[in-house]
Amino acid sequence: MTTYQLSCTIGSTDTTAKLGLEIWLDTNQLYNTDHVTDVSLPLTFDLDEDEAAHELRFVMKNKTAEHTQINETGDIISDARLTISDLAFDEIALGQLFIDLAVYTHDFNGTQAEAQTKFYGEMGCNGSVSLKFTSPIYLWLLEHL
C-alpha cells in the first residue's frame, strides 16, 4: 500500500502549564499528551494512502482559568497557548493554505457558547482545529496549492 507523510511542529507558549494535545486523523488517534513540554517539537506520521475524505484534528485539552492572567481592566497580560506550525504532506508545506482552510471550534473554556473561528497558528482555548482534505494527497495538493 502507498503511504504519505504528515508532519507538523507543536509547542507551548508556557511549558509549565500542563496543556494537553491530541492529534486525530478521522477516528485514529495519532498523538496524545497531557502536557506539551516543548516550545517546538517536530512530529511525523506515516499514513496509508487511500481514496477518501479525511479530517485532521488537533484537540487542545486541560486549559483552565489559572493559565490566563488578566489585569484589573480585563486585559490579558499572559496566557498559555499551544502552537501548531509547519504542517506538511510529504514535505510539501501547506503554509497559508492551512490557515485558510482550518476551522477552530472552541467554547472559550466554558465561559461562552461554542464558536467556530479562523485558526491563526495558536490555540488559546480547549477545543479543536480541523482540516478536511482528500486523498490521494497529491491530487488534493494540486487542487489547493
Image (spheres, rainbow, N blue to C red):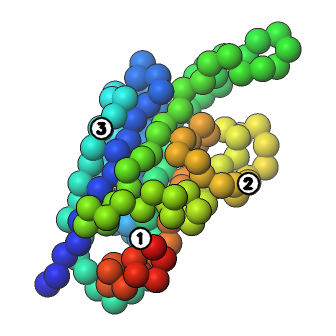
- Please tell me which residue is depicted at 39% across the width and 35% down the height of the picture: 11
Name which quarter of the figure residue 117 lies in.
Answer: bottom right
| Residue corresponding to mark 2 | 115
The residue singled out by tag 1 in the image is 26
Name the residue rendered at 57%, 66% in the picture.
101
In this view, 118 is above or below 89: above
Query: Which is more toward the observer, 6 or 21?
Result: 6
Q: Residues within 10 Å of mark 2 (few under 14, many from 20)?
A: few
Secondary structure type for disc 1: loop
| Residue appearing at x 37%, y 85% in the figure | 139
What kind of residue is marked 2?
Answer: Ala
Earlier sequence position, callout 2 versus callout 3: 3
| Foreground residue among 87 and 123 | 87
Instruction: Give the left or right position of residue 78, taking residue 144 as reference.
Output: right
- Residue type for callout 3: Leu
Residue denoted by label 3: 41
* Residue occupying the far top of the picture: 72
Mark nearer the N terminus (1 vs 2): 1
Depicted 12 relative to depicted 140: above or below:
above
Distance from disc 2 to disc 3, alpha carbons, whole Å, reads 28 Å
Amino acid at pointer 1? Asp
